[in-house]
Image (cartoon, helix red, strand yellow):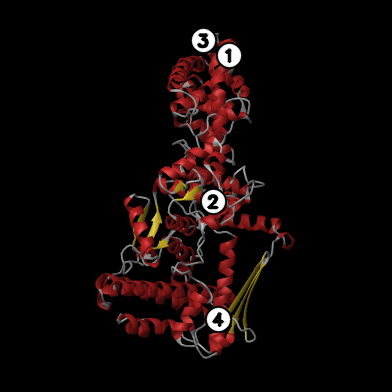
């Protein structure tokens, strides 16, 4: 890029632009030529230079005198820009626009908006302008005043151009990783118009498959886009048709996942992961020799690893465990549950585990449903004096459809009983019957305070990004030329000093030192100031939540200090936020528009018994898996509560 363009300080181009600003100021210093001698791109470049000073972004070797002089000079020069734009007439508007560099077109519209140049353009000329192939409606819609002034023309343009549907979806439906300027749509564009545009897009010759998927999963919203079931179905069918054409059997990448229960191996479990396969083998003899119900439930923790050492679901999707392309590439809805390869593999593996285990236990005369009943009716009473829990599980002779229909109310019932137990200290079924509010998984309370820890605020976002993100520039150092996943891994494996980094990185490392996340030793090497603090932050960054009471005392003391600094916050619920999202994804559409909605399918709509039996079988295993996870979480809650009482 041969000209200066404004970028914020976190952009690598920022430093290069600052170095060239002095030359631009000198070039225009004392410049008093008339409008005809000036180029439109010169004017916009001056505007970009001014943005750096307006945002107080300077080179570190500029003195205060330099800054003051440059700032005063650029403010004077900006008067030339103002006079230039205010003198633009509609007859030379198109000619000027075509001369604007591609990377300056957004600035061009900013200045048209700022100096109200649009008021000198009539409707006919504006219509000609927005129909130019060089004009991108996306850039124009960022400017509210222009949109309000030409609302009728823009509305008609969007109705005539089906690709406008992508702009509507971009604003109201798509998930954006970084902040973006909001788009403004004309008030004349009503909900009927929006659905017409989306229908036109679906019916167009070659709509983008990703956008079709977005439409198919949309939830109607009268404040954004109201869309009928008929349109949703049309998008779904069009997407399926495109998928059938694009993804043939030869184009798919197959990953083989195998679960084996073996009599011949001595180890309790062997898991082998290769590039295109996962194989998990389990010792059947060990299971046969340990059939007490407590151990059978513990197998989901220690054999199948449905949870980790903090009793957090291991099966949830974790943003920072996804690949770069999975995180930032593609198109997804802001209302969708984001999934990646690791999530999908774990989902398949865990379903195969519970299916195989269910059959193994059934062969031993043990029904997993009865083990769950035992947990609520006998175990909780014996271990924690939590009596009166009632539960009805599917019988052995129920069909798969009946099992799916029965298990959901059973799980919701025990969760409502648990909530009442937390709030009242006992279960009163008369009170439970009077309380008719629906079960919301986000609101199920915990028996203990400060159950979960979540990172919050700008300082948390900054420190975790700099240390742990694979997008942080600190993770690469020219001195050793080795590539690590992040700065944390680099510091763990290499000895580095501040002088080993360029100036733009030193500022960020000094921030970490000033905030006591890093320090330097006597030899000048960069080290972690408090290793346990860094471990806690790393755990939070990659797992999104910490179970406070599963950390040792020193870790909890650090978390208490972080909470005082508003770097973390505590919350007391049975399920953590990632777990709540995971459950909602499978059971309903209260949080995500791409959820499986199994609760609605079996509790409300009552699917036909003619549906494929394998579908019901698979869905039952999903519901049973959620029930097992619920059992583990309730047990963890009681265990922590009991330990705290003893202490």
* Residue drawn at x 40%, y 77% as measured from the top left: 410
Where is residue 309? Give x, y as percent. Answer: 46, 69
Where is residue 214? Give x, y as percent. Answer: 55, 52
> In the figure, residue 240 lies in which quadrant?
bottom right
* Residue drawn at x 46%, y 86% as measured from the top left: 395
For label 4, the residue is 357
Give the mark nearer the N terminus: 1 vs 3.
3
SS under mark 4: helix
Q: State which mark lies toward you, 1 or 2.
A: 2
Q: Determine the CA span between mark 3 and mark 2.
A: 51 Å
For label 2, the residue is 491
Give the mark nearer the N terminus: 1 vs 2.
1
Where is residue 647? Give x, y as percent. Answer: 29, 72
Where is residue 335? Give x, y as percent. Answer: 48, 54
Q: State which mark lies toward you, 1 or 3.
A: 3
Give the mark nearer the N terminus: 3 vs 4.
3
Residue 226 in view, yes or no:
no
Q: Determine the CA span between mark 1 and mark 2.
A: 52 Å
For label 3, the residue is 30
């Amino acid at each position: 890029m041969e000209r200066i363009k404004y970028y914020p300080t976190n952009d690598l181009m920022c430093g290069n632009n600052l170095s060239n600003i002095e030359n631009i100021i000198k070039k225009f210093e004392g410049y008093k030529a008339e409008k005809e001698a000036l180029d439109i791109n010169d004017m916009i470049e001056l505007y970009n230079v001014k943005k750096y000073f307006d945002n107080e972004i300077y080179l570190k070797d500029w003195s205060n005198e330099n800054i003051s002089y440059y700032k005063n000079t650029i403010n004077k020069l900006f008067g030339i820009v103002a006079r230039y734009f205010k003198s633009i007439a509609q007859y030379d508007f198109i000619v000027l626009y075509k001369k604007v560099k591609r990377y300056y077109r957004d600035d061009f519209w900013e200045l048209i908006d700022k100096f109200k140049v649009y008021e000198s353009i009539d409707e006919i000329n504006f219509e000609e302008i927005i129909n130019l192939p060089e004009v991108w409606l996306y850039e124009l819609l960022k400017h509210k005043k222009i949109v309000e002034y030409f609302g009728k023309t823009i509305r008609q343009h969007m109705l005539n151009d089906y690709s406008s549907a992508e702009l509507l979806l971009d604003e109201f439906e798509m998930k954006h990783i970084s902040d973006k300027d909001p788009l403004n749509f004309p008030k004349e564009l009503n909900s009927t118009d929006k659905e017409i545009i989306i229908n036109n897009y679906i019916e167009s010759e070659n709509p983008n498959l990703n956008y079709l998927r977005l439409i198919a999963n949309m939830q109607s919203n009268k404040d954004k886009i109201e869309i009928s079931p008929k349109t949703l179905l049309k998008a779904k069918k069009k997407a399926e048709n495109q998928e059938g054409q694009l993804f043939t059997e030869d184009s798919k990448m197959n990953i083989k996942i195998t679960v084996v229960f073996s009599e011949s191996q001595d180890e309790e479990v062997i898991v082998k992961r290769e590039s295109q396969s996962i194989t998990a083998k389990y010792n059947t003899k060990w299971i046969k020799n340990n059939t007490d119900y407590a151990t059978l439930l513990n197998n989901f923790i220690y054999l199948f690893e449905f949870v980790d050492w903090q009793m957090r679901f291991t099966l949830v999707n974790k943003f920072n465990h996804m690949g770069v392309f999975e995180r930032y590439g593609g198109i997804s809805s802001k209302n969708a549950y984001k999934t990646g390869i690791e999530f999908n593999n774990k989902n398949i593996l865990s379903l195969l585990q519970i299916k195989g285990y269910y059959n193994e236990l059934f062969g031993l005369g043990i029904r997993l449903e009865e083990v769950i009943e035992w947990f609520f009716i006998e175990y909780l009473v014996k271990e924690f004096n939590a009596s009166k829990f009632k539960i009805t599980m599917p019988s052995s002779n129920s069909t798969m459809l009946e099992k799916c229909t029965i298990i959901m109310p059973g799980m919701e019932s025990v969760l409502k009983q648990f909530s009442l137990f937390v709030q009242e200290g006992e279960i009163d079924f008369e009170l439970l019957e009077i309380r008719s509010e629906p079960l919301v998984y986000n609101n199920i309370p915990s028996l203990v305070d400060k159950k979960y820890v979540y990172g919050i605020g700008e300082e948390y976002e900054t420190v975790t990004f700099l240390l742990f993100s694979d997008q942080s520039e600190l993770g690469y150092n020219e001195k050793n030329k080795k590539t690590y996943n992040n700065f944390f891994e680099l510091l763990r494996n290499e000895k580095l000093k501040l002088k080993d980094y360029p100036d733009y990185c030193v500022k960020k490392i000094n921030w970490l030192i000033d905030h006591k996340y890093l320090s330097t030793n006597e030899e000048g090497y960069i080290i972690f100031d408090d290793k346990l603090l860094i471990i806690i932050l790393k755990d939070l960054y990659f797992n999104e939540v910490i179970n406070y009471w599963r950390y040792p005392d020193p870790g909890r003391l650090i978390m208490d200090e972080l909470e005082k600094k508003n770097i973390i916050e505590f919350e007391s619920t049975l399920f953590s936020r990632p777990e709540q999202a995971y459950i909602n994804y499978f059971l309903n559409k209260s949080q995500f528009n791409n959820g499986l909605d199994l609760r609605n399918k079996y509790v409300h709509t009552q699917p036909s018994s003619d549906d494929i039996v394998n579908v019901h079988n698979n869905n039952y295993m999903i519901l049973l898996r959620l029930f097992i996870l619920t059992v583990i979480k309730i047990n963890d809650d009681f265990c922590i509560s009991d330990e705290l009482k003893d202490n």
